[in-house]
Amino acid sequence: MHLEELMARYAKGERDFTGVNLAGANLNSINLSGANLTGAFLGSASLNRANLTGVNLKGAFLYAANLSYARLNGVDLREADLTKATLTGASLVSANLTRVKLSGAILRGVNLRQANLTEVNLCGANLNDINLRSADLTDANLNWANLCGARLSGAIFTRTKLLGAKLSRAYMNGIDLSHADLDGVNLSGSKLSGTNLSHANLSAANLSNAYLRVAILNQTNLHAANLEHASLANADLTQADLSGSELSRADLSGATLTHANLNAARLQHANLNHADLRDAYLWAARLDHATLDGTQLHGARLQGATLSGSSLDTDSNVSAHSLPTATFSVA
């Protein structure tokens, strides 16, 4: 079917164009909203700024197609092939992209708010500044993807793969990342306030300058993580493993760190005011110049810790057996 014939039939009210072959066609700014293009062949077609709202593109072949700034809201793209397609600035709000092939696709600035991305393979994809708010990423593969500055609040990350992903400056407030494997992931400057990271693996992750206020991090693995300048005020770090972590100048005011492992952690100049460190392990920890006003330290193990220049008011409760081998000098 030629493009002219398709447009004429569309103008007369026809909407079913199942299996149509428009490979390589110039479809810039075309309006095919509501059409049925199931299994259509649109490889290398140019659909720049096209209106495809509500179109059925299930199983369509869109290899290397140009969909820059196209309107694809509510589109059904299940199992479609968008390998190496260009989707820069496209709007796919509430679109269904279950099991879509997106290898090598360009997705910069795409709006995928409330989209279904179940089982999508985005391994290594460039998703810089993408909008994925409230999107469903269940079982999606985001390994090594670039999600710097991405908006992810409200997104579903059930069993999502994020190995090696770049999430610096990402907006992830309030999402559920419990049990997630984020080993070594870059989350510097990310917004994670109120996020559930319980039981997650953040070993060696970069969380410098991250916002984790009131975040849930109980039993989280943060071994050797970089949390320098991170905001963890009122966060729950019960039984968290922070051994060998970098927490210098971090804000841990009001945080719960009961039974946490902070052995060999670096907490110089950290704010621990009113934090709960009861029964925490702080062997060989560096607490020099840390503020500890109102901090609860009953039962904390401080053997070999250094606290020179730290502040500790009279309300703090330190068990006597914790101090004999600590270098402890109250400023």
Image (cartoon, rainbow, N blue to C red):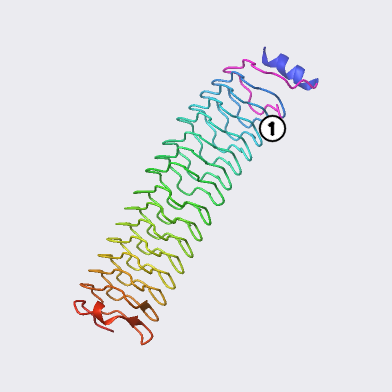
Is residue 137 rendered magenta in the image?
Answer: no
User: Does residue 308 appear in the picture of this structure?
Assistant: no
96 lies above or below 198: above
- The kind of secondary structure the magenta stretch mainly shows is loop
Quadrant hosting residue 88: top right
171 lies above or below 103: below
Task: Assign a secondary structure to mark 1.
Answer: loop
The residue positioned 50% from the left and 60% from the top of the image is 193
As drawn, is 216 to the left or to the right of 2? left
Dot 1: within a 10 Å radius of its alpha carbon, few (fewer than 14), some, or many (20 or more) residues? many
Q: Which residues are magenta?
A: 13-33
- Residue under label 1: 54
As drawn, is 70 to the left or to the right of 284? right
Position of the C terminus by quadrant: bottom left
User: Does residue 276 appear in the picture of this structure?
Assistant: yes
Residue with the most extreme left position = 325
